[in-house]
Amino acid sequence: MSAPATHSLHPEGAAAREAQARRARLRLWFALALAASVLALTAIGSWTYRAVERSLRDSRAGALKAVLDAQAKTLEVWIEDQKLGIRRLARDPGVRQHVRALVEIAAEHGETPERYCSAPARRPLVAQLDDALAGSGAVAFNIVDRTGRIIAAKFREYCGLAMSEQATAQELVPVFRGETRFLRPYRDAERLARTPANPPLARPLVWIETPVQNEAGRILAALGVGQYAHEQFAAILAAARSGDSDEVYAFDRNGVMLSASRTLGAEAALAQALRVPGEGGLTRLAAQAQAAAMGGVPSGMLLEPYPGYTGRAVVGAWRWLPAYDMGLAVEMAAEEAYAPLAVLGTVFGTVFGALVAAVLAALAAWFSAVRLRSEVEERRVGAYLLGERIGEGGVGNVYAARHDLLKRPTAVKLLKPTRATDEITARFEREAQLASQLSHPNMVEIYDYGRASDGSLYYAMELLEGETIGKLVLQEGPLPVARAIHLLRQACAGLAEAHGKGMVHRDVSPTNLMVCHYGGEYDFLKILDFGLVKNIAAEEQETITRTLRLLGTPLYMAPERLRDPADVDARADIYAVGAVAFFVLTGRRMFETLDDLALTSLVLNEVPPRASAVAAQPIPEALDMLIAASLEKRREDRPQTIGEFGDVLEALAVRFRWTQRDARAAWEAHRARAAGA
């Protein structure tokens, strides 16, 4: 029998055509779905990009404003402190007596400077002022009478010279009305009608001028004290630098820098104009500030990139300070400010060309991750059988485990293979080695250290039952004073052993202090995470420490660590314990900002509030003073040892007792709330 024909009326031909049509429909639906996905991705990506851009600009604006506000306040405080000192000096009876004698001689022999420049009253006046200003940073001083003549000066070359008309009108006239004035950086050629042939002061100075009065209150002359502008004045502005390109500088109404430049150094003061290289015009920031100096808007924010004085595209903010006839500006490179946008744009642009590959890669990665997770969860590390993962950090994962023979519950920290660089490996090894040298009960105990069969580094430590102080305060709110003292005493005790062995923890924070139920005792504190411990007695740690930069928790870093991460001793831990105490008692951070640039400026420049002013509960005065002392900017002003800190807590513990009954009740209440949640 012949085979059936496969023409249009045959059933097999119809089935083939139906299958072909079905495949065509599937291809069509796939094409439509792909097109819809691309369109949806385009819309979502565009919206996301714009939203991120707006959010980043708002965040950057807030950060720039915070830095500018902090620096303006710091500069104002410094200026007022300088004014207070010179006013006190001008009221000194000896200074008044010598100035009065010189003024009388100058009035009688005004055309003969030698008469008053060599008068007997000059030498004791100069000696007294030299002695009074020693160590203050002052490098020059002068006495100017009502005619604008310098009738006495630290350097003989200036005596007898006259102030310029501009300096007299702008600065001396207000002083002879009774004001104490801050004079922004000037060169001698601007201040004086004629400069000395060999001026002893070649660099720009800032001046504080105040009136000297006689006993009847009549103003006799103006006392001026000068400091080099590149020293304290410039250092205040330079302290705000934290990134790779940001800087704060002062400038005058003509758009000339008055302080040091991050790029050009101290020589930029009164030499570098804020002009666009190759164009000659003022930068946008300088032009806006110049308008403000003439009565315009007193401050501004420039978030659209513009060419700065070095030619590099920057963003910035500025404020005109009319009281000092100068402006303050903060600028940073646009590429640093908006670095996330560049990354986002690159990613967004490559998504379309790699859409299918990305989906396939995601599926493959998911299956691979599931397989790897299963292998990790079940594999053996040395003598330990790993269980569930109970924690994850930047370089390692922590697993609940059990010793194969002892059956002891253990925590095993396993270094991630993807993070096993030479530096990270050295830090991981150092963490285990240093922690194993400590035997204090309040330090986490290290049981074992080694390599897994695949070469991964691990160490085994105590498996603790409890909560970190950070999580406990987040859930419970501020802790009672007695409980806080009880926990802080234990932290001091553990750190005392480390400090005694020449080690500094460097990352004491609420997340690294764990409140445990340990050995049948409640509220037993354990100090965790030795990854940033520095052995200040061991030279071999220098390379690792130097590459750490600012690893750690910035809010709990002492100011000296922010300035130089390698400059650290036990007093940095004391600062951190004080910051933790503030958090535990108030339930609040010392500085409420999440922006690293603003936070760095606040830690460096702002005095944190007293715990007693913030806390909802009464804080004992001794504890309040201890916390404030521990948070001093200068480490010399803090308690010098952790033992001193602990001694104050021990004395307070007599009045604020926290018993095991109290601790057990707190734990039971905490567990009940957790179970109810």
Image: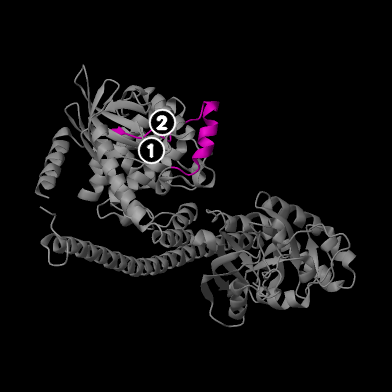
| Coordinates of residue 105 in the picture (x, y in percent) | 83, 68
- Residue 613, numbered circle: none
Contact, CB < 8 Å: mark 1 with mark 2? yes
Circle 2 is placed at which residue position? Answer: 428
Q: Amino acid at mark 2?
A: Phe
**Highlighted range, magenta:** 525-551
Question: Can you say whether 421 is above or below 589 in the image?
Answer: above
Q: Is residue 640 visible in this depiction of the protein?
A: no
- Residue 195: which quarter of the image? bottom right
**Residue furthest bottom as drawn:** 295
User: What residue is at 54 percent from the left and 67 percent from the top?
Assistant: 316
Q: Amino acid at mark 1?
A: Val
Circle 1 is placed at which residue position? Answer: 395
Q: Specify whether 19 is left or right of 251.
A: left
Q: CA distance from mark 1 to mark 2?
A: 9 Å
Nearest the camera: 550 or 8?
A: 8
Q: Is residue 105 visible in this depiction of the protein?
A: yes
Q: Is residue 547 magenta-colored?
A: yes
| Coordinates of residue 308 in the picture (x, y in percent) | 62, 67
- Residue 332: which quarter of the image? bottom right
| Coordinates of residue 395 in the picture (x, y in percent) | 38, 38
Question: Can you say whether 570 is above or below 114 in the image?
Answer: above
Nearest the camera: 71 or 400?
A: 400
Please tell me whether mark 1 sits on a helix, a strand or a loop: loop
